[in-house]
Amino acid sequence: MEIEKHPVVKKRIKGMLGAFVQHRNAANLLMLLLLMFGFWGATHLQRQLLPNLEIRVVVVSTAWTGASAQDIEKNILQVIEPSVRFLDGVTKMSSSAREGSGRIELSFAANTDMQTAEDEVQAAVDTVQNLPTSAETPKVTQVSFFDPVASIGISGPFPEQSLRQYAREIRDGLLDEGLDKVYLYGYREHEIVITVDDAKLRQYDLTLDDLSRALQPGLFDRPSGTLDGAFQAQIRAIAKELSVEQINATVVKSLPSGEDLIFGDIATIDDKFNDDISLGFMRGERAIQLAVARAVSSDTVESYNKIQAYVKEIRPTLPQSLNIQVFDAPAELVDDRLNLLVKNGLSGMVLVLVILFIFLEMRIAIWVAVGIPVSILATLGVMYFTGQTLNMISMFALLMTLGIIVDDAIVVGEHTATRYALGDSRQQAAVTGAGRMAIPVIAASLTTIAAFAPILIVGDVIGQILAALPLVVIAVLVASGIECFLILPGHLSHSLPKVRKAPGWFRRNFD
């Protein structure tokens, strides 16, 4: 059944909404701009597990070989602290000492230029003069953020030295592939431990410093001395060139009798690995873990793909008995969440088309459904140009707001169809349908914005993590508003059927 056409008097509709409705290409051009803007952002957004974090912490670390924790605190930490505590921007200072080393952590206020802060801390530390002469020069470093990508475990029936060699080769290969950071766990440093009987030290009037000086300088990364009760003393060193045999034959001092006292006469020398580092096991075999992390400028999924490709490439060159397993990959979580976002977006479009086709014209249903990708892409563009990334927080916000986009477009499309059925012209129906829905839709959007906006003022690390949530929600609402009140009415005004039809069976019964 068809409804008789009524003559409609055409008149100029004023305002921005009227301009978009009456112009044949305005809505299309704006939609094209939003799509291009969003496509650029979507193809350049980094994918990662967590948002990029600026850790506003500078660390001052100092090593003092053989010193106790109490000596480190008294002679190093308490000497440096007054010089750095009251620097501009410092909000918190904490320090810790242990045998052989100490560190001071300085936390800075938000919006602090961390490079300038690091330079100021370095300058302040350089002014400290009365540190122990045997202590190393304090090192000043800014704490950097590295996001986990995946871990690689290697294990097999190999000596520890061989397993370490394979781990180093894989680590170097990953770094050559462009990955940012590779941490080794269960990788024990090779060291030579010299254990000396305290009685022999006294007998020959020797000290640990005498023994350290007897070893050729430059062959050790970090000599250290400990005294174990009254019975024995140890010198632990990470040897680069000397072997156990060479150390055994090294002369400590010349005796009055004319004989040379060598290390083999007074010490037991063991070639071993550092026991302070925890051992790793995988499938019951000794293992070393390589934890790969990315810097703020890298993409988690791309980094993970590089890892997979590299492991596949080197697998044939390694022994078959060497087990290599990639595990604990946050990149897979990111990929799954992205797939869920795309799946929900597509299923939402299909559901909108099916439901609206039952109640409204097919062309109205299509243009309402088109609002979903337009709004999402526009939001991705905003995210890119505001420095956000596709992470678990921002993707959660996008998933949460998919329903808001659909709701806004549906009410505008439905009211436009109603006004047209009541006798308005196509252009007037589009303007009236959008205009009358503007206040309730905007009011609903403002209440949502009011709920999320306070998160923007949350500070510290938690504020940086959650900042994507309100930004994405607000961007989606603004993009949805532009699509609903400028683009959609323009399309509907040219898509409504020229011949008015009676409402379908579903609409008549539900109304």
Image (tube, helix red, strand yellow):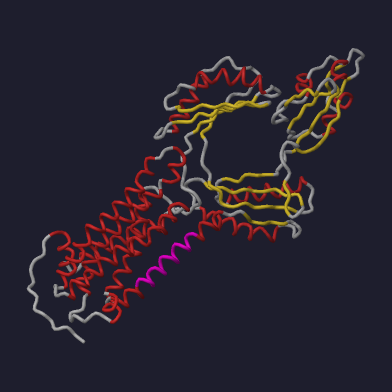
Q: Is residue 333 above or below residue 427?
A: above
Name the spot of residue 287 as percent of width and height, x first: 72, 49
Q: Which range of residues does the magenta coloring cover?
A: 337-352
Is 15 included in the stretch rendered in magenta? Answer: no
> In front here: 198 or 240?
198
Would you say 99 lies left or right of 138 here? right
Q: Residue furthest right?
A: 257
Residue found 21% across the figure and 69% down from its top: 416
Is 343 included in the stretch rendered in magenta? Answer: yes
Name the spot of residue 436 as percent of width and height, x first: 19, 62
Residue found 21% across the figure and 75% down from its top: 496
Q: How many marks?
A: 0
> In front here: 106 or 470?
470
Name the spot of residue 242 as percent of width and height, x first: 78, 33
Residue found 16% across the figure and 73% down from its top: 426
Q: Magenta residues: mostly which secondary structure?
A: helix
